[in-house]
Image (spheres, rainbow, N blue to C red):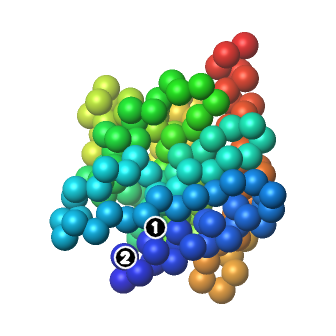
Amino acid sequence: MADTMGKKWEAEFKRGWIKAFPSHFIYRLPDQVSGYKTTSQNPCDFIAYAKKKLLMAECKAHAGASLPFSAIRQFDKLISYIGTVDTFPGVLLWLYEKDLVLWIPAEDLKYMRDVEGKKSVGIKALTNSSYNIIQIPAEKKRVFMDADYNALMDRLIELEERKNG
């Protein structure tokens, strides 16, 4: 079921992005068919552009209150884009049992894993002010969440400006 929810979540993200930014770019990087789930060379699921910024989103749908880092197969590829100008690499996490949509920047993921030795990320991380995790405003529609990606991009740009200025 998790794979099915994940694929449907990816489709919902694309639909929501197009709704928020109808004349902007979004591209789903095709899954590589090699016969091995762990051999993907893609850094993320989607590359999207809006407000003169590039979003590199790895979409994850997960039950419970946290996502294990081991479930982010592109982790090392994704974090390699940390520090790229005008680019926001990260994980778009839908905790479907909690009706929450979170944006977790790759920089925070790397810090949690490599510096703090954490094994997962989730709801508890929202209370830590040293992280830049964003709870995206979203409304539940039957099963899926209708998330506000304009709000996500505005918050990412605000955090970037605060960091750089």
| Rendered position, 151 above or below 79 | below
Question: Residue 44: percent from the left, percent from the top?
Answer: 44, 51
Residue located at (74% from left, 59% from top): 148
Quadrant of the drawing holding the C terminus: top right
Residue type pointed to by label 1: Ala
Q: Secondary structure at mark 1?
A: strand
Q: Specify the farthest residue to the bottom.
A: 142
Q: Quadrant of residue 4?
A: bottom left
N-terminal label among 2 and 1: 2
How many numbered discs, if any?
2
Q: Position of residue 43 (x, y in %)?
A: 40, 47
Q: Label 2 amino acid? A: Ala
Labelled disc at residue 61: 1
Query: CB under 8 Å between callouts 2 and 1?
Result: yes
Q: Could you say where residue 77 lies in the image, as x and y percent from the top left?
A: 35, 41
**Pointer 2 residue:** 2
